[in-house]
């Protein structure tokens, strides 16, 4: 409805505002329909949807009998338009602006890993002088825009893009050489896809060949035709090496920030378990929005899917590797207001956790015996 049209304004003449109820009657047909339970739709009254800090959550979102609804009060004086979103968007223009800022940072190199299906560059930000190689990638699933805000916060702190230097970021650059990929799937994010690239491939299932369960035929992956984004990234990782890895995502169902590890891989043992526990405990201490108890139910030993990104990296490089998930919903057990403004500092806080586990990433001794009790691995569960 165009509330600025003369006809509509004539109907509501004399009123300053009108409360409108929005109904999505086919919400039950969404990919993860059950995740609507407990969700709250974001709204902004700005003239553009790309002002991330202008969004706030509606207070009366409901999902009942397969129908999603919420209300919004439109002011009839001035511009009465509004935008609604599952989570605030992160534009490709903002991504390019971030890359341009990084390119101007001293000691930083911005380069392309290769081209996407549609020919876009896969931007990578390399910085730091340390011997340990740390790769952090974002937006495999393009609909999970919180991952871009996370990348922005990480790069802002790591490179002091706001001219605020701190000792942790300086230490991180001394200990690590970072390879940060802020958006590995720009085709998907610019085209408005939820989980795939321009070829229709779910990149988080393209990290090695796998058997089709229905036909027992081998599915080749990654390939330049279906998944060049993964193909080029793995090529560069094989050349550079990897000692620590994070794949940044968003989860529709669980109302928590959490880490999903590589428990189902053959390399998982006391070393990786202890690294996972210490990393997560340190992360919790650095940022109250992180927690350890709730996550996906861990895979059983040797039953993990090797074509999933963080699993493949753990197996391929015998290193600490995990998927970090952020919620679309409010962050349960934390103060209200989870959104872009808190996804950014969560990205920056990862540097504390990486610096903390750095001494043990390639430690072949029983280092866990010297870790404090609060760093012990907590076996997570999806129940809460």
Image (tube, rainbow, N blue to C red):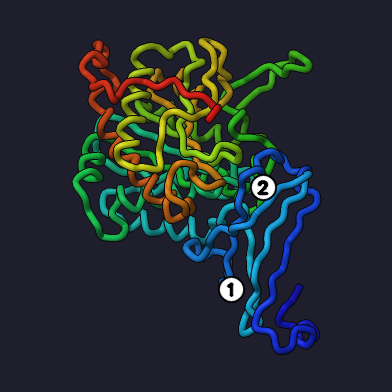
Residue that carries the numbered disc 2 in the rendered image:
193
Residue at 58%, 19% in the rendered image: 305
Assess disc 1: are there few (<14), some (14-19) or many (≥20) residues with their C-alpha within 10 Å of its C-alpha.
Answer: few
Question: Residue 220, image x and y in percent?
Answer: 66, 23
Question: Residue 330, image x and y in percent?
Answer: 52, 47
In the displayed structure, 66 sits above or below 103; it is above
Residue 184 seen anywhere in this rendered image of the structure: no
Nearer the observer: mark 2 or 1; the answer is: 1
Q: Secondary structure at mark 1?
A: loop
Residue that carries the numbered disc 1 in the rendered image:
47
Residue at 63%, 57% in the rendered image: 60
Pick whichever, 384 or 359, lies toward us. 384
Residue at 44%, 20% in the rendered image: 379
Q: How many marks?
A: 2
> Is 173 left or right of 287, judged from the image as shown?
left
Q: Secondary structure at mark 2?
A: loop
Pick whichever, 287 or 150, lies toward us. 287
Q: Tell me the distance, in whole angstroms, between the alpha carbons under discs 2 and 1.
A: 23 Å
In the displayed structure, 355 sits above or below 8; it is above
Pick whichever, 17 or 6, lies toward us. 17
User: In the figure, residue 349 lies in which quadrant?
Assistant: top left
Residue 26 seen anywhere in this rendered image of the structure: yes
Residue at 59%, 73% in the rendered image: 47
Q: Which mark is residue 101?
A: none
Question: Residue 172, image x and y in percent?
Answer: 25, 39
Question: Residue 224, image x and y in percent?
Answer: 62, 34
In the displayed structure, 91 sits above or below 359; it is below
């Amino acid at each position: 409805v165009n509330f600025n049209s003369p006809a509509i304004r004539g109907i509501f003449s004399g009123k300053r505002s009108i409360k409108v109820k929005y109904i999505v009657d086919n919400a039950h047909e969404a990919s993860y329909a059950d995740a609507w339970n407990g969700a709250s739709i974001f709204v902004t009254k700005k003239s553009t949807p790309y002002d991330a800090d202008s969004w706030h959550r509606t207070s009366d979102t409901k999902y009942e009998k397969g129908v999603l609804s919420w209300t919004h009060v439109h002011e009839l004086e001035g511009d009465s338009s509004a935008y609604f979103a599952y989570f605030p968007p992160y534009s490709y223009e903002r991504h390019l602006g971030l890359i341009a800022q990084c390119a101007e940072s001293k000691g930083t190199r911005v380069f392309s890993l290769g081209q996407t299906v549609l020919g876009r560059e896969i931007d990578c930000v390399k910085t730091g002088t340390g011997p340990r190689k740390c790769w952090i990638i974002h937006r495999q699933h393009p609909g999970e825009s919180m991952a871009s805000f996370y990348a922005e916060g990480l790069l802002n702190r790591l490179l002091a893009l706001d001219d605020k230097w701190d000792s942790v970021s300086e230490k991180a650059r001394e200990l690590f050489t970072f390879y940060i990929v802020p958006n590995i799937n720009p085709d998907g994010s610019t085209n408005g896809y939820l989980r795939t690239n321009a070829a229709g491939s779910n990149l988080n299932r393209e990290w090695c060949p796998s058997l089709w369960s229905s036909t027992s035929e081998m599915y080749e992956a990654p390939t330049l035709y279906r998944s060049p984004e993964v193909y080029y990234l793995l090529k560069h990782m094989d050349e550079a090496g990897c000692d620590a890895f994070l794949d940044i995502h968003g989860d529709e169902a669980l109302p928590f920030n959490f880490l999903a590890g590589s428990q189902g891989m053959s390399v998982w043992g006391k070393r990786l378990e202890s690294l996972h526990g210490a990393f997560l405990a340190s992360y919790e201490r650095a940022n109250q929005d992180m927690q350890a108890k709730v996550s996906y139910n861990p895979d059983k030993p040797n039953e993990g899917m090797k074509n999933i990104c963080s699993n493949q990296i753990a197996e391929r490089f015998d290193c600490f590797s995990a998927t970090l998930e952020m919620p679309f919903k409010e962050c349960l057990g934390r103060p209200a207001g989870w959104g872009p403004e808190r996804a950014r500092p969560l990205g920056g806080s990862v540097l504390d956790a990486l610096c903390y586990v750095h001494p043990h990433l390639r430690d072949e001794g029983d280092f866990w015996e010297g870790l404090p009790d609060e760093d012990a691995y907590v076996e997570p569960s999806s129940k809460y």
